[in-house]
Amino acid sequence: MEGLGATLASLGRNCQNSGKLDLHFLCAELLKKDKFNIWHLLHEDGFEGRIQFIDFNAKQTFGKLRSLHGDWTTYGRLLIPEIIRSNIVLYLDSDHIETDILQFADIEFTTTLSAVKEGTVH
């Protein structure tokens, strides 16, 4: 949750027009108070976009695959095409970003999967 908090704070502070954003959170066993804290953190920083929490049972859905330290939550990203109805989706892991996320809106994606080739680690 700490990494997610840093990402959300950065998103809120660096996005010029957060009203253009729809944030979808894939939640496996996320407590109601944690969802409220996410919502509160975003709105405290002036977030004006839409927020949706999508609950799923990670173990039931992906339990036949090998877990990461007993957790299957990371496989949730494989559900994105099924549950988010949009032509373009930008998946962000809970890493810290210090950029206006809307700068990616001008990129013309030509494949099903696009990724950053390299980056700087601070």
Image (cartoon, helix red, strand yellow):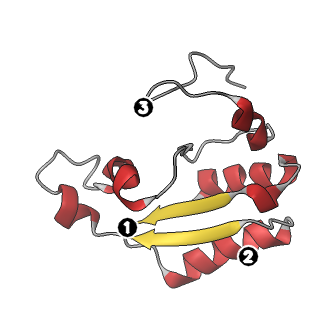
Q: Which residue is mark 2?
A: 40
Q: Compute the Cα span from label 3 to label 1.
A: 25 Å
- Considering depth in this image, is 76 or 33 the residue closer to the camera? 76
In the image, what residue type sits under mark 3? Thr
Residue drawn at point x = 74 percent, y = 65 percent: 49
Asked whether the residues under the numbered discs 1 and 2 touch, taking CB atoms below 8 Å apart as contact, a structural biologist would say no
Say which amino acid is labelled 2: His
> For the view shown, which residue lies furthest in the top direction?
118
Direction from residue 115 to residue 107 in the image, left or right: right
- Image coordinates of residue 83 in percent, x first then y, are 39, 61
Q: Nearer the viewer, mark 3 or mark 2?
A: 3
Q: Which mark is residue 92?
A: none
Question: In terms of sequence position, does the residue under pointer 3 or pointer 2 come before the other?
Answer: 2
Q: Is residue 79 left or right of residue 31?
A: left
Q: Please tell me in which quadrant of the rendered image residue 47 appears.
A: bottom right
Q: Residue furthest left?
A: 64
Q: Quadrant of the C terminus?
A: top right
> Could you tell me the amino acid type at mark 1?
Ala
Quadrant in the picture for residue 48: bottom right
At 37% from the left edge and 67% from the top edge, which residue is drawn? 28
Q: Residue at x 80, y 57 (%)?
A: 18
Q: CA distance from mark 1 to mark 2?
A: 20 Å
The answer to whether mark 3 and mark 1 are in CB contact below 8 A is: no
Local packing at callout 1 (Cα closer than 10 Å; few below 14, some 14-19, many 20+) is: some
Question: Badge 2, how many Cα within 10 Å: few under 14, some, many 20+?
Answer: few
Outermost bottom residue: 32
At numbered mark 3, what does the secondary structure look like: helix, strand or loop? loop
**Secondary structure type for disc 1:** loop
Nearer to us of marks 3 and 1 is 3
Query: Which residue in the structure is indicated by mark 1?
Result: 28
Q: Secondary structure at mark 2?
A: helix
Task: Name the disc covering residue 112, or none.
Answer: 3
